[in-house]
Image: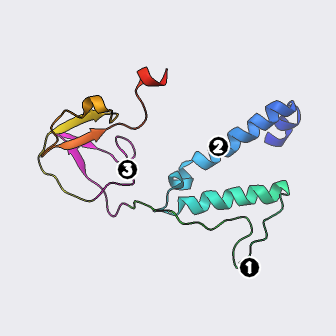
Amino acid sequence: MLPQMLLGQPARDLALTHARLHARTLAAPKMLGRGYQQKGHLMAATYIAEQFKLLGLAPVKWDNPSQNEYFQDFRLSLNLVNGKPNLVLGEQVMEIGEDYIVKANSGRGEILDAKVCDLGYGLPENFNKSFKGKIVLFRAGLPERITK
């Protein structure tokens, strides 16, 4: 049914339909967030390589003959989470990936009771706060007043 529907579409709409299909596939739960801990990144990379082959794209000839021709080896620092992280604020249990994300430069630790100091976006105007003995919360990105 889908191929028949695609035949009647203008080229621009067809390209958009294909892009949406690939985005949905890569964002689907079966890709496990394309994360490293459950090998979702390998599933996503394999899917993309298969699409390259279907399009007839020529593979790269690498110096290392054992290297897959559609993949490029590179090093990447990772912050792997062992076990299930536990973050409770007051009575509210926070879920990793839904309520918060562990930043790549985060360390390990256990804090049983501490106040949270909101640093906002880490701008100098917030540096006059005392952080000793507190959990520092900072936000990614820039505030709306700067991005406008």
Tell me the distance, in whole angstroms, between the alpha carbons under discs 1 and 3.
Answer: 36 Å
Number of numbered tags placed on the structure image: 3
Secondary structure category for the residue under label 1: loop
First in sequence: mark 1 or mark 2?
Answer: 2
Of the pair 146 and 22, the residue shown nearer to us = 146
Query: Residue 57: x, y in percent?
Result: 83, 57
**Where is mark 2, residue-wise?**
23
Question: Please, what is the dominant secondary structure of the magenta stretch?
Answer: loop
**Where is mark 3, residue-wise?**
103
First in sequence: mark 3 or mark 2?
Answer: 2
Query: Residue 34: x, y in percent?
Result: 54, 54
Residue 1 appearing in the image: no
Q: Any magenta on residue 113?
A: no
Secondary structure category for the residue under label 3: loop
Secondary structure category for the residue under label 2: helix
Q: How crowded is mark 1: few (under 14 residues within 10 Å), some or many (20 or more)?
A: few
Q: Which amino acid does label 2 sit on?
A: Ala
**Where is mark 1, residue-wise?**
65
- When the figure is inspected, residue 140 is found, relative to residue 77, above or below; the finding is above
Left or right of residue 85, residue 33 in this image: right
Q: Which residue is drawn at 53% across and 49% down?
A: 29
Residue 118, numbered circle: none
Of the pair 126 and 40, the residue shown nearer to us = 126
Q: Nearer the viewer, mark 1 or mark 2?
A: 1
